[in-house]
Image: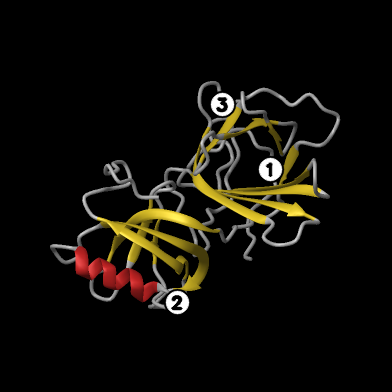
Amino acid sequence: MNRSFMLVPLLWLVLGCTAQPDSNGALPEAVVTDTQPPVVPASFTGDLPCADCRALRYQLSLFADGAFFLRQTYLGKPPPNEFDDIGSWAWPGDGQVLLLRGGREAPVMFGRGAGDTLQLLDLNGRAIDSELNYALRRDAVFSRLEPRLNMRGMFTYMADAPAFTECLTGQRWPVAQRGNYLELERAYLDTIETPGQPLLATVEGEVRLERGMEGDQLLPTLSVLRFGGVWPGTSCGRRAAAEAP
């Protein structure tokens, strides 16, 4: 994985107005002043208590566009022992709680810990009363997760350039034309009424950095591991009576 971020205390995570991401989605290092706190991306890692495994490892990637990737690994358990989630992050209210809204029923919440740490909170957003470690420490350099999970998004295909705009993150990724991709493309072409029309699709997918079709730039790219279905007449913000999974 490419790692490229400076270790700085976590004060507020804000998007710089003029900074442009590089090929890995990373922004340049920020000039830290009273009016310009450090910017994302940022990543955090920590081994937290686990009732039936050696430890529950959290790995969290926060992106400048407000998206996050989260992985929880049950150390000491046989595969499948990794579970990924993606979605959007925010610092609502007084900015003391980091809120992760992903595919779970309830958001995951962290408090701002001392220095460069995040402290896992309980389901009510309160500190966990324990002498055990519930802290994630900011990585010295940015680490971008490559999540693998079931996804919903708006798929488009035009001029041999398939793309997928994922619902929870709002991120738009090119789609690799391999694996089970052809099932998605055929279902799309059999369903749309006009060329290039966005169509809600469900897939099991993996997002990895890959070289684009033109040039050497690395781009987050979706690989379709399993095709789920297409859902005409629906969108990320609107579901039909027979809801898409």
Q: Which class describes the residues within 10 Å of circle 3: few (<14), some (14-19), or many (20+)?
A: some
Under circle 2, the secondary element is loop
Give the foreground label among 2 and 1: 2
Alpha-carbon span between mark 2 and mark 1: 41 Å
Give the foreground label among 3 and 1: 3
Residue plotted at (49% across, 61% down): 22
Q: Within the image, what quadrant is residue 157 found in?
A: bottom left
Q: Within the image, what quadrant is residue 187 found in?
A: bottom left
Q: Looking at the image, which is closer to me, 104 or 169?
A: 104
Q: Looking at the image, which is closer to me, 139 or 160?
A: 160
- Quarter of the image with the N terminus is bottom right
User: Mark 3 vs mark 2: which is more N-terminal?
Assistant: 3
Alpha-carbon span between mark 3 and mark 1: 17 Å
- Residue 31 drawn at (x, y percent): 58, 43
The residue that mark 3 highlights is 95
Return the mark for residue 179.
2
Q: Looking at the image, which is closer to me, 238 or 63?
A: 238
Q: What's the residue type where badge 3 is placed? A: Gly
Q: Is residue 95 above or below residue 115?
A: above
User: Mark 3 vs mark 1: which is more N-terminal?
Assistant: 1
Residue plotted at (23% across, 54% down): 232
Q: Within the image, what quadrant is residue 238 found in?
A: top left
Residue furthest left in the image? 194
- Residue 199 drawn at (x, y percent): 26, 57
The residue that mark 1 highlights is 8
Q: Which class describes the residues within 10 Å of circle 1: few (<14), some (14-19), or many (20+)?
A: some
Under circle 3, the secondary element is loop
